[in-house]
Image (spheres, rainbow, N blue to C red):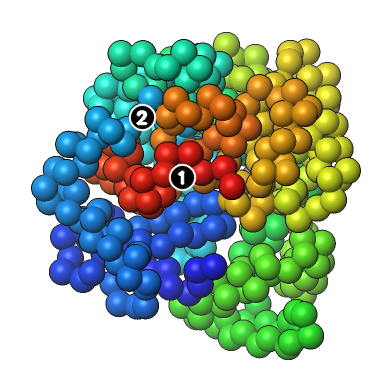
Amino acid sequence: MVNRTLQRVPEKLKDFSDKNTLKFINRASHGDWIFWMGAGRAALKQQAIGAGFTLFRATGAHRLASRITRGLGAILMFHHVRPWAGPSFAPNRLLEITPDYLAEVIETLKREGFDIVSLDEGLARLQSGGSANPFAVLTFDDGYRDNLLHALPVLKHYRAPFTLYVTTGFAEGTARLWWLELEQAVRGLPHIELALGGTNYIFDCRTAQEKADSFNRLYWLLRVQPEEEMLQSIHYLAQKADIDGQAITRSLCMNWDEILEIAADPLCAIGVHTLTHSMLAHRRIDFARHELFESRRIIEAKTGKPAPHLAWPVGDPASAGPREFALARELGFASAVTTRPGMLFPAHAGHLTALPRLSVNGNWQDVRYLEVLLTGAPFALWNRGRRVNVA
Ligand SMILES: [Zn+2]
């Protein structure tokens, strides 16, 4: 588990030219991962991977490697798409990009020779062993209103098909965006005291820097608790800060009318993202089965269309593993995407409920970074050459 306090994310990729050592860390939050540079501690392996990334840009080695490492294509993962509001404390910024950057991503995919295809088409290409061009599938998680307001116009402009994975409890305003509740609690409180697992923790949260450090520590302390305790603790902090969690959900997530509006666009396919956005590997199998079965049933009833595709909430190995992958198969899902980083290879046709994705990270909105990722070379290093990671 990597400590989020290690994160000091530079604003722009131009910082890659910095003489500081580039390091590479896995941020298991939402399975996302970031490149990070500057002073700090990192494992030798991470340094080796980071140095390799610097080398890619300097030598173009990623271009040479791409024939082997790019595979058949990639499923790209997005969350929020909206103009940047620019708060100094923004620990969840990795989960949002601007509409302009979404357009740049699409332009970059085209320039790099990718066909932008629907998830169904991507899966067909995966199962048939691919086609002349690599393919890219665009996916958006959770069901944010900004997807309708800011992403859809860009997607329509480029006629880019996309899949929107909807958490039904977000659409109903009942499920909790707990990572945003935590962010708002840390933003609002100058001081936090919290008892977790028999230990009392105290955090100073006066300055933006203290808030960032405290959020990182709190996030990881909470993530290793049983999910229900994590949710209770965040609810406690939110109450202290006078924050209404369901109001956050209602202000940020599409309601059913809005989901049906975006779903009516022929470019859009609605996928399943559970009832409550629970990390299902933490839960009993019956709970997980109900979350998958019932959320699909609701989405199909609302849209009048089959919803055979699933995205695992949070989606890292601690949130969805072999038990969940088998459960999705048992329930007849045609595919399920994780947030494990990677490109798609023919072998993934045998693991359609455990597909990797390429996260479009809001901390790194620079196409030079994306170009390297699209070669698949960083993933090959990160996964130590292993193309399929389903354990
Ligand atoms: Zn999600």
Q: Is residue 212 visible?
A: no
Q: Residue furthest left?
A: 59
x, y (%) of residue 168?
Answer: 77, 35
Q: Is residue 360 depicted above or below 157 in this figure?
A: below
Q: What's the distance in space between the residues labelled 2 and 1, CA to CA? A: 13 Å
Q: Quadrant of residue 318?
A: bottom right
* Ligand 1's quadrant: top right
Give the quadrant of the N terminus. bottom right
Residue at the location (59% across, 36% down)?
A: 354
* Left or right of 360 in this view: 381: left
* Left or right of 75 in this view: 373: left
Residue 354 is labelled as: none
Q: Amino acid at mark 1?
A: Pro
Q: Amino acid at mark 2?
A: Gly
Disc 2, SS: loop
Q: Is residue 292 visible?
A: yes
Q: Quadrant of residue 10?
A: bottom left
Disc 1, SS: strand
Q: Are marks 2 and 1 in contact (CB under 8 Å)?
A: no
Residue at the location (36% across, 18% down)?
A: 115
Q: Is residue 200 depicted above or below 234 in this figure?
A: below
Q: Is residue 376 depicted above or below 384 in this figure?
A: above
Residue at the location (66% across, 47% down)?
A: 321
x, y (%) of residue 187?
Answer: 60, 70
Q: Earlier in the sequence, mark 2 or mark 1?
A: 2
Name the residue beneath numbered marker 2: 71
Name the residue beneath numbered marker 1: 341
Q: Is residue 154 depicted above or below 357 in this figure?
A: above
Q: Quadrant of residue 6?
A: bottom left
Neighbor class of circle 1 (other Cα within 10 Å; few <14, some 14-19, many 20+) is many
Q: Disc 2 or disc 1, which is closer to the eye?
A: 2
Neighbor class of circle 2 (other Cα within 10 Å; few <14, some 14-19, many 20+) is many
